Amino acid sequence: MTELAGQQTLPTTFPSPVVTADIQIRRSLEEGITQLEHFTNAISNRAADEDEAAKERRLLRGNMHLFAYLLNAVTADVLIEVQGYNRAWADTMADALEDKLEGGDYYPEMLWQWATERGLDPEAVAAEAKTRIDQKDTK
């Protein structure tokens, strides 16, 4: 370490955090159970005087928690299964998953690339989705 005006300074580079399958599985199980409780609460706790707008907000919150629950449950499930085949590979996948979950800006472009590589037309898929959304919004 170097000193600056009598104070020690930290090094400018830090090692990457170690993420193992066991760590990611534990995180996913804890968060999955938490999100399931939030989902259950949002779906089942209806106020007696709840209007349509409040009901819609409650159900939208419930959906948000449902998707978070499913993401965490599937993450734990897949990593546990991979561990059954090869623990070292599961650790490698957990570390890669951690990186990918932190890089949300990576996916919009990659979805287009992956779709194109598999013979899909991402513009057509997006246009079809927009049409369905517009039709739903007009009902």
Image (cartoon, grey):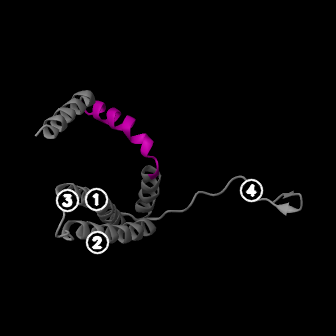
Q: Residues within 10 Å of mark 2 (few under 14, many from 20)?
A: some
Amino acid type, label 3: Lys
**Mark toward the viewer: 1 or 3:** 3
Residue 76 falls left or right of residue 48: right
Q: Earlier in the sequence, mark 2 or mark 4?
A: 4
Residue 26 % position (x, y): 40, 71
Q: Residues within 10 Å of mark 1 (few under 14, many from 20)?
A: some
Residue at mark 4: 11
**Mark toward the viewer: 3 or 2:** 3
Residue at position x 16%, y 70% in the image: 48
Q: Which residues are magenta?
A: 102-120
The C terminus sits in image quarter? top left
Residue at mark 1: 61
Q: Earlier in the sequence, mark 3 or mark 2?
A: 2
Q: Residues within 10 Å of mark 4 (few under 14, many from 20)?
A: few
Amino acid type, label 4: Pro
Q: Earlier in the sequence, mark 1 or mark 3?
A: 3
Residue at position x 43%, y 69% in the image: 22
Q: Residues within 10 Å of mark 3 (few under 14, many from 20)?
A: some
Badges 1 and 3: C-beta atoms under 8 Å apart?
A: no
Nearest the viewer among 124 and 113 is 124
In three-dimensional space, the C-alpha distance between marks 1 and 3, rounded to whole angstroms, equals 10 Å
Residue at mark 2: 37
In three-dimensional space, the C-alpha distance between marks 4 and 1, rounded to whole angstroms, equals 43 Å
Residue at mark 3: 55
Query: Residue 115 shows which numbered tag?
Result: none
Residue 119 colored in magenta in the image: yes
For numbered disc 2, what is the local secondary structure?
helix
